[in-house]
Amino acid sequence: MNSVHGHNRIIIFARPPRPGQCKTRLIPAYGSIGAARIYRGLIRRTVQAAVESKRAAVELWISDTPSHPFLGRLASEFGLVQRQQRRGNLGQRMGQAMSDALRRGAGSVVLVGTDAVDLEPLDFHTAFEYLKSPDRAVLQPSLDGGYVLIGLNHTPAARLNRGIQWSSGLELDQTRRRLLEAGLQIHLMRPRLDIDLPADLRRAKRANLL
């Protein structure tokens, strides 16, 4: 079961793993059903790492309605709260979700996507340890120039993701600048591997991550 440790929150952003609507860049190599199956595995890995860290209450934020049966079963299995992402671009939705958690009393909040194949419980532990001090932020880079995890204990979360060029390879640098402009100290964590392209999947298999 999902345990609450203090008042921290882990927010997992996920989309329903419907064939043809997720991991579309994998479809030419693996087909729509194969790509959806790969994505389901990534979601489960992320949830397991978050829950096994035992550092926070874990919430599964879904990008679309209705929720997929797989996500409902996963939430039931791990005792997760399911919430609906609001409208807007990715940065707006992330900021709204983190602000919501902080308004509900979270001391620190970590938001993570579901594309990283090698996330570990230790990643969440490291993030929350750094966030124990005020006015801090954490970013966990991905190997493609973006990032897989962001953590804050500072309230203006809704403003920090504005003006970011998503899916550009510039997300990490742009977000880092916005955090610095907000007066936050930043800790960059160990990079992780996002699975977006067939080459990413091959790399993960060579590293025995899959």
Image: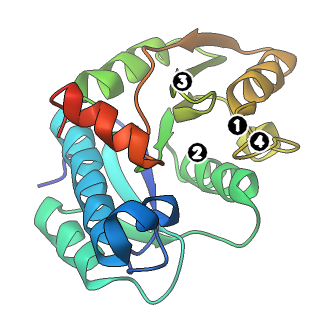
Q: Which residue is mark 1?
A: 155
Q: Quadrant of residue 164?
A: top right
Q: Closer to the N terminus: mark 1 or mark 3?
A: 3
| Of residues 45 and 197, the one drawn nearer to the viewer in this rendering | 197
Q: Closer to the N terminus: mark 2 or mark 3?
A: 2
Q: Nearer the viewer, mark 2 or mark 3?
A: 3
Amino acid type at mark 3:
Pro
Q: Name the residue: 29% across, 52% down.
A: 42
- Taking the view exactly as shown, the residue that stands out farthest to the bottom is 66
**CA distance separating discs 2 and 3:** 23 Å
Q: Are marks 2 and 4 in contact (CB under 8 Å)?
A: no
Q: Closer to the N terminus: mark 3 or mark 4?
A: 3
Image mark for residue 161:
4
Q: Closer to the N terminus: mark 2 or mark 4?
A: 2
Q: Name the residue: 46% across, 16% down.
A: 132
Residue 117's place in the image compared with 11, above or below, is: above
Q: Secondary structure at mark 3?
A: strand
Res 15 visible: yes
Q: Residues within 10 Å of mark 3 (few under 14, many from 20)?
A: many
Q: Name the residue: 51% across, 59% down.
A: 25
Q: Which residue is mark 3?
A: 141
Q: Closer to the N terminus: mark 2 or mark 1?
A: 2
Q: Are marks 2 and 3 in contact (CB under 8 Å)?
A: no
**CA distance separating discs 3 and 4:** 15 Å
Amino acid type at mark 2:
Leu
